[in-house]
Image: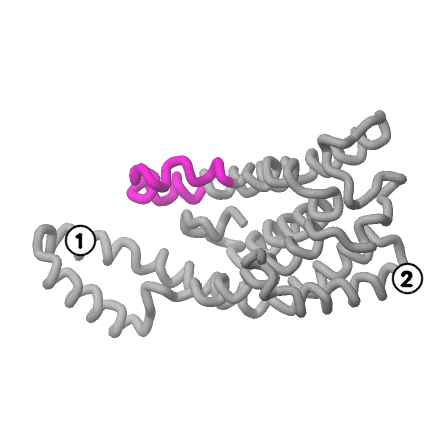
Amino acid sequence: MSVFAVLDPAVGLAHDVVATLAQLMPTAAAIVLFTVCVRLALHPLARAAARGEKSRARLAPKIAELNRKHKGRPEKLQAALAELYREEKASPFAGCLPMLVQIPFFSVMYRLFTTPNDLLGHTLFGVPLGLHVGGAQDVAQWVVFGALYAGLAAVAFVNFRRARRAQAAAPQQAAQPGLRFLPFLSFGTVLFAALVPLAAAVYLLTTTAWSAAERGWLHRGGGAPVSAVALI
């Protein structure tokens, strides 16, 4: 049994909602509408995550100074950090929990569009939603897949540029080996889309475009810290 089987009740509910919407509009449009509605419902969590990221970015210089001051003295450093967070009424994990809460939704959508069901028998411009890019056999199918991948690549490039600007604004973080190549992970969605059916690619384009626009709105007027969250 797949570890994702525990999500089946939620997957069934998501299927029923999309199937109901598909009676009123094309199935691909129903997928987009359902995704937008759920992301809108999750927006308060995204706002909480953004506040947490801004809090960590604001404290970053003070934390760097404490690291320099207490270098080689981990116990004093931990005590100083705890005091800093207490004074600032902040947490080193601020913003992480809201993002973790969103993971089950993404898992449900992934299972919905990668498990055989009647929705995948519908089409987008004549291309079955259950078709993988490797199964494309004519020009029309390649055009549809190409358009989706071009959209995903455009969103990935926006996220990539945003992450690079954030690194430029925080050279201490960019110098860390683990973070130097983080912006390139933005293009992971394009590669992932090549492994899933067309329906999942439609979902990926919708949710990544929403994330890019939402992040731009929440972090308007200032750079966001470099993090994996920035690349979702």
Q: Residue at x 34, y 40 (%)?
A: 178
Structural crowding at the residue carrying mark 2, measured as other residues with C-alpha within 10 Å and reported as few (<14), some (14–19) or many (≥20): few
The answer to whether residue 169 is visible is: yes
Judge whether 194 appears above or below 208 on screen: above
Q: CA distance from mark 2 to mark 1?
A: 59 Å
* Residue at disc 1, secondary structure: helix
Q: Which mark is residue 67?
A: 1
The part of the chain drawn in magenta is: 165-185
Q: Nearer the viewer, mark 2 or mark 1?
A: 2
27 or 157: nearer the viewer: 27
Amino acid type indicated by mark 1: Asn
**In which quarter of the view is residue 197 placed?**
top right
In the picture as drawn, the residue positioned furthest to the front comes out as 1
* Residue at disc 2, secondary structure: loop
Image coordinates of residue 120 in percent, x first then y, are 80, 49
**How many callouts does the rendering have?**
2
158 or 124: nearer the viewer: 124
**In which quarter of the view is residue 24 placed?**
bottom right
Amino acid type indicated by mark 2: Gln
Image side of residue 115 versus residue 224, left or right? right
Judge whether 157 appears above or below 23 on screen: above
The residue that disc 2 covers is: 23
Q: Residue at x 64, y 38 (%)?
A: 195
Q: Residue at x 73, y 37 (%)?
A: 132
The answer to whether residue 29 is visible is: no
Image side of residue 194 versus residue 179, left or right? right
